[in-house]
Image (cartoon, rainbow, N blue to C red):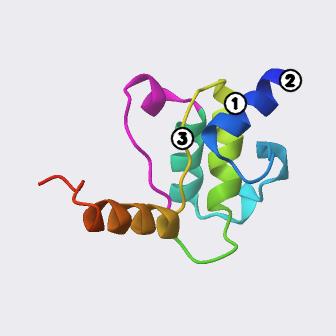
Amino acid sequence: MRSIRYRLGIAKFPVLKDLEGFDLPSLLGGERRQIRTLCQGGFMEARTNVVFVSGTGTGKTHLSVAISIRNGARIRFINLLALVNKLEQEKAEGKASG
């Protein structure tokens, strides 16, 4: 449990969640397959980014946390608003690239 808390701190996750608490049956068939594929963690081994896009309260953060914990991965979580703010700040400071 200590290592999980440490990884959550590094990743900047706001909460601790697992897949058992996610309402997978409510998703459409294609969405369920995509989530199951992501849960296997292949995208992490391939060092590929994943972006969840949907409305508020649909489980994007929940899935991010649960998939990371399930795979024991070291990752970095950032929500869109924080990312945009960070990019705007870097642009204002002249740190933006290309």
Provide the residue designation for mark 1.
7
Provide the residue designation for mark 3.
76
From the top left corner, tell me how far across and down residue 58 is, in percent: 66, 70
User: Pointers 1 and 3 in contact (CB under 8 A)?
Assistant: no
Residue at the extreme left: 98
Question: Is residue 53 in sight in this rendering?
Answer: no
Badge 1 marks a residue whose secondary structure is: helix
> Does the stretch in magenta take in 81?
no
Left/right placement of residue 44 relative to residue 17 reads left
Which amino acid type is shown beneath numbered disc 3? Arg
In the image, the segment drawn in magenta is 40-53
Badge 3 marks a residue whose secondary structure is: loop
Label 3 CA crowd tier, 10 Å (few <14, some 14–19, many 20+): some
What label sits on residue 2 in the rendered view? 2
Q: Earlier in the sequence, mark 1 or mark 3?
A: 1
Badge 2 marks a residue whose secondary structure is: helix
Residue, x 44% and y 61% (percent of image)? 83
The residue lying toward the viewer, choosing from 33 and 73, is 73
Q: Which of marks 2 and 3 is nearer the N terminus?
A: 2
Which amino acid type is shown beneath numbered disc 1? Arg
From the top left corner, tell me how far across and down residue 85 is, in percent: 44, 68
**Quarter assignment of residue 3:** top right
Label 1 CA crowd tier, 10 Å (few <14, some 14–19, many 20+): some
